[in-house]
Image (tube, helix red, strand yellow):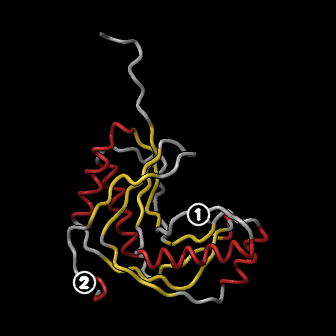
Amino acid sequence: MLTLFPPSNTLCEYFIIISPPHLIKKEVKSIKYEFAKKNGVYTGLHSHAHITLMNFLQSEERERELAQSIRKIVSEQPCFYVLLKGFDFFPANNTFFINIKNKKPIEKLYEALRVSLYQNRLSLKNIKKGCTPHLTIGRKLSDDQYINAYKSFSEKSYTAGFNVDSLTLLKRGNSVDRWSHFIEVPFIKKIDCTLL
């Protein structure tokens, strides 16, 4: 039977992230809760530690192509080492974060993903042209919280590192839904990244 109005494509939001190991997630959670104890609740307090590569809207019907595009790029990607060092700030949106010293491998991965998604005619409408790799502690802080973060963390040291050997793709139906794990895509080329 032919219908006048075919079923609409369901738009979902997708989020590609680098997920640090459990120990770093635990340390970041501790930093977040210690800050909240002194300064009150804030956006990002309950989110798991991660490095955002990109998030975008995509028709749910295109999930297979999306997963294939990501797998293709990741299969050609050697693992790399991420060095987290110190804290930094984005004053434009009252955000503070752990700085990443070696941003280039993440920036190259981001660009490869962006090109691959474009070549596979997946929606790039909401994807930025570049990324600034970082690990957010708090964002959209009140002015007082931001000032306190700056006073407390601008001179504080933090150093950790980890091998990145997979990407995580999260999914949600709309902006009020919780993120759910969609796929974990391991890098095919695994080497000892700490030697690089």
Q: How many marks?
A: 2
Q: Residue at x 61, y 73 (%)?
A: 32
Q: Nearer the viewer, residue 73 or 18?
A: 18
Q: Residue at x 52, y 50 (%)?
A: 178
Contact between marks 1 and 2 (CB within 8 A): the answer is: no
In the rendered image, the quadrant that contains the N terminus is: top left
Q: Is 33 displayed left or right of 181 in the figure?
A: right
Front disc: 1 or 2: 1
* Rendered view: 28 above or below 41: below
Q: Residue 164's spot in the image, x, y percent?
A: 34, 74
The answer to which image quadrant residue 168 occupies is bottom left
Q: Is 11 displayed left or right of 147 in the figure?
A: left
Question: In the rendered image, which residue does mark 2 sit on?
Answer: 192
**Residue at the extreme right:** 144
Q: Residues within 10 Å of mark 2 (few under 14, many from 20)?
A: few
**Circle nearer the N terminus (1, 2):** 1
Q: Residue 102's spot in the image, x, y percent?
A: 42, 81
Q: Which mark is residue 138?
A: none
The kind of residue tagged 1 is His
In the rendered image, the quadrant that contains the C terminus is: bottom left
Q: Residues within 10 Å of mark 1 (few under 14, many from 20)?
A: few
- Label 1 SS: loop
- Label 2 SS: loop
Q: Residue 158's spot in the image, x, y percent?
A: 54, 87
Q: Nearer the viewer, residue 160 or 122?
A: 160
Question: In the rendered image, which residue does mark 1 sit on?
Answer: 46
Q: Residue at x 45, y 42 (%)?
A: 12
Q: Residue at x 73, y 83 (%)?
A: 151
Q: Residue 44's spot in the image, x, y percent?
A: 60, 63
> Spatial distance from mark 1 to mark 2, Cα to Cα?
32 Å
The kind of residue tagged 2 is Asp
* Rendered view: 145 above or below 63: below
